[in-house]
């Protein structure tokens, strides 16, 4: 056996290089595609944040929500006052009955 390189070896080496280059090209393509999707997702998220801040967190909306909460708290306070008055009446009745 001599040290000469045969055509089969050259063709095998070229085929091997072609296969490695093809795999590398596919990986590079997928990486670029994933990077593009990531950038698009970042842009979409920024646009969604802006939309939400414009639509859902307006000063007028916050004032309306605050007013609703205060009305609800006042209603609870009124009910507590009503319970307090009823308890006073019940306690007054029991105190007058024992005194007589």
Image (cartoon, rainbow, N blue to C red):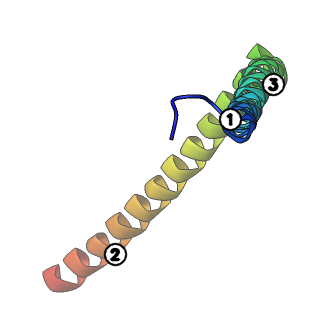
Left or right of residue 48, residue 90 in this image: left
Residue with the mark numbered 3: 44
Q: Residues within 10 Å of mark 3 (few under 14, many from 20)?
A: few
Q: Nearer the viewer, residue 98 or 77?
A: 77
Lower sequence index among marks 2 and 1: 1
Using the image, tell me which numbered label, if any, was put on residue 6.
Answer: 1
Lower sequence index among marks 3 and 2: 3
Tag 2 secondary structure: helix
Which residue is painted at 66% across and 38% down in the image? 9
Q: Nearer the viewer, residue 24 or 94?
A: 24
Q: Nearer the viewer, mark 3 or mark 1?
A: 1
Instruction: List x then y, in percent, for residue 94.
Output: 24, 80
Instruction: List x then y, in percent, for residue 95.
Output: 20, 75
The quadrant of the rendering that contains the C terminus is: bottom left
How far apart marks 3 and 1 lie (CA) works out to: 57 Å
Q: Nearer the viewer, residue 12 or 89?
A: 12
Residue with the mark numbered 2: 90
Q: Nearer the viewer, mark 3 or mark 2?
A: 3
Instruction: List x then y, in percent, for residue 27.
Output: 69, 33
Instruction: List x then y, in percent, for residue 16.
Output: 68, 38
Left or right of residue 90, residue 17 in this image: right
Query: Which residue is outermost to the left?
Result: 99
Q: Is residue 27 above or below residue 54?
A: below
Q: Nearer the viewer, residue 91 or 56?
A: 56
Marks 1 and 3: in contact by CB < 8 Å?
no
Which residue is painted at 76% across and 32% down in the image? 18
């Amino acid at each position: 056996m001599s040290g000469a390189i045969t055509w089969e070896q050259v063709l095998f080496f070229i085929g091997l290089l072609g296969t490695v280059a093809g795999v590398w090209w596919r990986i590079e393509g997928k990486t670029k595609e994933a990077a593009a999707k990531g950038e698009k997702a970042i842009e979409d998220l920024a646009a969604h944040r802006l939309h939400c801040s414009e639509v859902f967190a307006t000063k007028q909306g916050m004032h309306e929500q605050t007013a609703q909460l205060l009305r609800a708290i006042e209603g609870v306070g009124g009910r507590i006052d009503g319970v307090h008055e009823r308890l006073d009446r019940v306690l007054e009745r029991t105190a007058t009955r024992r005194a007589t």
